Structure formats: structure tokens, C-alpha cells
């Protein structure tokens, strides 16, 4: 069962008052356990994505800094070449 397959009625029924029969109680407990496992899995996946995003952001910041340095170098060379031609 995927998280998308769980609708509001399933959640309300699972987390509501216990059912009258033992079979329903077991069924509800199993459904609750599945939902909790799916939530924990989703949290782990989000943590992994966050770590990856932070890593990529660090790479982007490093590259942006390098680009700024290169642009300053190009600007300086351009000014030096313009002065030599005058």
C-alpha cells in the first residue's frame, strides 16, 4: 500500500475508536503499522534528499565563486589589452 493509496477514510478509520471485533482490531493495528512504516520511510527519503541538496548547493556555491574569480580575471585582462592598444 503506497501513501497515495491511503485516503482520509482509511486514516480516520485506522486512528479512530477500536473496532468491535478482534479481527478488526488486528486489521486496524496492521494498517496503522503500515502507515507508520510508510511515514518513516518517507522521512528517511526526505533526509537523504536534503543531504543531497545541501551537497549540490555547496558545489554550486563553489562554482559560482570560481566563476566570479574568472570573470574578474577576464575583465582585468580586457582592460590591460585596451590600455596597450591606446
Image: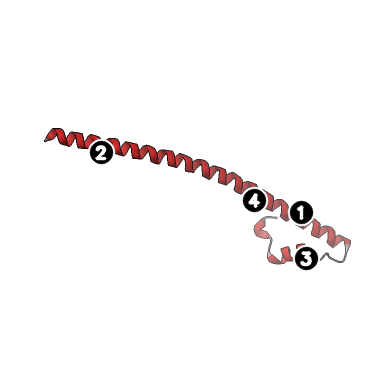
Viewer-side label of 2, 3: 2
Residue tagged 3: 16
Residue tagged 2: 75
- Residue shown at the point (60%, 49%) measured from the top left: 46
Q: Position of residue 19 (x, y in %)?
A: 84, 65
Number of other residues with Cα within 10 Å of mark 1, as a class: few under 14, some 14 to 19, many 20 or more: few
In three-dimensional space, the C-alpha distance between marks 1 and 4, rounded to whole angstroms, equals 14 Å
Label tally: 4
Query: What colouring style does the render use?
Result: secondary structure
Of label 1 and label 3, which has the lower sequence position? Answer: 3
For the N terminus, the quadrant is bottom right
**Marks 1 and 2: in contact by CB < 8 Å?**
no
Of label 2 and label 1, which has the lower sequence position? Answer: 1
> Does residue 61 appear left or right of residue 43 in this picture?
left
**Marks 4 and 3: in contact by CB < 8 Å?**
no
Residue tagged 1: 33
In three-dimensional space, the C-alpha distance between marks 2 and 3, rounded to whole angstroms, equals 68 Å
Residue tagged 4: 42
> Does residue 29 appear left or right of residue 68 in this picture?
right
For the C terminus, the quadrant is top left
Amino acid at each position: 500500500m503506497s501513501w497515495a493509496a491511503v485516503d482520509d477514510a482509511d486514516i480516520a478509520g485506522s486512528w479512530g475508536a477500536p473496532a468491535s471485533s478482534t479481527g478488526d482490531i488486528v486489521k486496524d493495528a496492521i494498517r496503522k503499522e503500515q502507515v507508520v512504516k510508510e511515514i518513516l520511510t518517507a522521512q528517511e527519503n526526505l533526509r537523504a534528499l536534503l543531504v543531497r541538496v545541501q551537497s549540490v548547493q555547496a558545489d554550486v556555491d563553489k562554482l559560482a565563486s570560481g566563476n566570479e574569480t574568472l570573470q574578474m580575471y577576464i575583465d582585468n585582462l580586457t582592460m590591460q589589452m585596451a590600455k596597450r592598444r591606446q
